[in-house]
Amino acid sequence: MEHRPTILIAATDRWYPTARLGMALTQVGCIVDAVCPAGHPLELTNAARRLYDYNGLAPLRSFTHAVHHTNPDLVIPADDLATRHLHDLYQRGNGRGKTGAEICHLIRRSLGDPTGFVTILERSAFINLARQEGIRVPNTVVLADKEDLLDWISREGFPAVLKANGTSGGDGVKILNTLEDAERAWRKLQAPPLLARALKRSLLDRDLTLLRPCIRRQRHVVNAQAFVRGHEATSTVACWEGNVLAGLHFEVVEKMGTTGHATVVRQIEHPEMTAAASKIARRLKLSGIHGLDFMLEAETGDAYLIEINPRTTQVGHLALGDAHDLPAALAGALIGQTISRPAIASENDMVALFPQEWKRNPKSPYLATAYHDVPWQEPAMVSACARQALKHARQVSPAYPPKKAAQSTEAPTPLVAEQNKI
């Protein structure tokens, strides 16, 4: 590779999959820099050349500083808040001379056509756009008030799904089965952030994201979405100027809680999911990495598109073949030539995500039967992930781990077993 493209990863939280993406980009020849909070897992790896501090008290200044010093070919947001910061940075850059124009050009090159930014962040607007493209979607509407909620339930019945704009990771999603649950969820989802939570985020995390809407008593926009009986599926795609370069499609086998993130996935080929990703990428003229969430209807297997994640996802680093390797596809687009890795991560179509599945269930059978996605080449990160997973297990079940005398037989062993295979 004659030219090594520089990619700036933009993160506002300490998400382990972000570090995995950085490692994967480095492996395909990219130079990786990142703007992220102190203590980010990237610090435990050899993936990033330089790390720049993300200051939640001055987020746009943090991003601008990192862009100025790295001069990247591409910026990849690692979470929804990072995407919103980039959208705000684009709006601020308009009309601000040469420097503003350069940042706007970078964001447009990295994310796609800015005219679609608002649609991407508004759940109902995105679903309406997908419907216009002939994509199968569940009926989704914005609820203006409680009366709209009651009217929706009278027409659609239960179960019902409520989703708040500006939320992610399942935090703003509620699946409801009774009128009492619906009214309680409505009050919680549309309410402004609690003052105690906003102050904690401001003082401890140096993040003012919640403080302004808390002071202004700004309420979330809440959407109602028709419930699809079936199971979840997800796609992650690398796009360039409206074209899908590579894609990964999975059905969700296990997940963290009722509405949480996936922990075990199975790779599938689903023509309807593939077609939907291509139509969305073309319509919004997307670039970079984006995720799409689906429900596969139980009776028919039909794929209903339920939302978009305008950022990298927790499976974006997986190298599962030439058409299923997002980091290689993006690097190839940046240098104008095809990049192919000599080997894929695994032939096993079942993937247990690390540390997510170990955190969900330290004794999960999938840790032994699926491809357990452990980054053994970065032992410091593996150790940190393991400590976090054990801490979570103790919080969920105080009796875990077993007493010291029994640890040799009762404690989870898949990490050791998998390492011995390498």
Image (cartoon, helix red, strand yellow):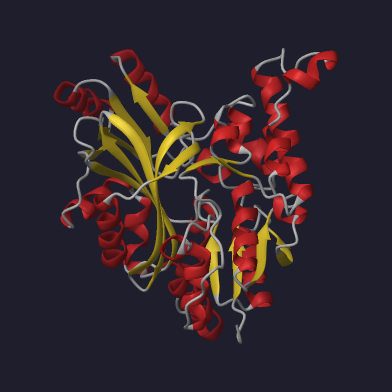
Q: Position of residue 208 (x, y in %)?
A: 61, 47
Most distant residue in the front direction: 421
The residue nearer to you, when weighing 71 against 415, is: 415
Is any part of residue 308 visible from this angle? yes
The foreground one among 119 and 372 is 372
119 up-or-down from 64: above or below: above
Q: Residue at point 67% right, 50% down?
A: 375
Residue 70 position, x and y percent, is 66, 75
Q: Specify whether residue 125 is in view.
A: no
Position of 197 relative to 317 (above/below): above
Q: Quadrant of the N terminus?
A: bottom right
* Relative to 148, 322 lies left or right: right
Q: Answer with the quarter of the image where residue 400 lies.
A: top right
Q: Residue 9: x, y in percent?
A: 60, 63
Identify the residue at image location x=25%, y=61%: 279
Q: Tell me if residue 192 comes above or below residue 6 in the rendering.
A: above
Give me the residue at 35% from left, 58% from top: 118
Quick one: 332 or 371, which is closer to the camera?
Answer: 371
Q: Is residue 222 placed above or below 177 in the rendered structure?
A: below
Please indicate whether residue 3 sits to the left or right of residue 165 in the image.
Answer: right
**Is 364 displayed left or right of 183 in the figure?**
right
Q: Residue 347: percent from the left, percent from the top? A: 50, 50
Number of numbered discs visible in the structure rendering: 0
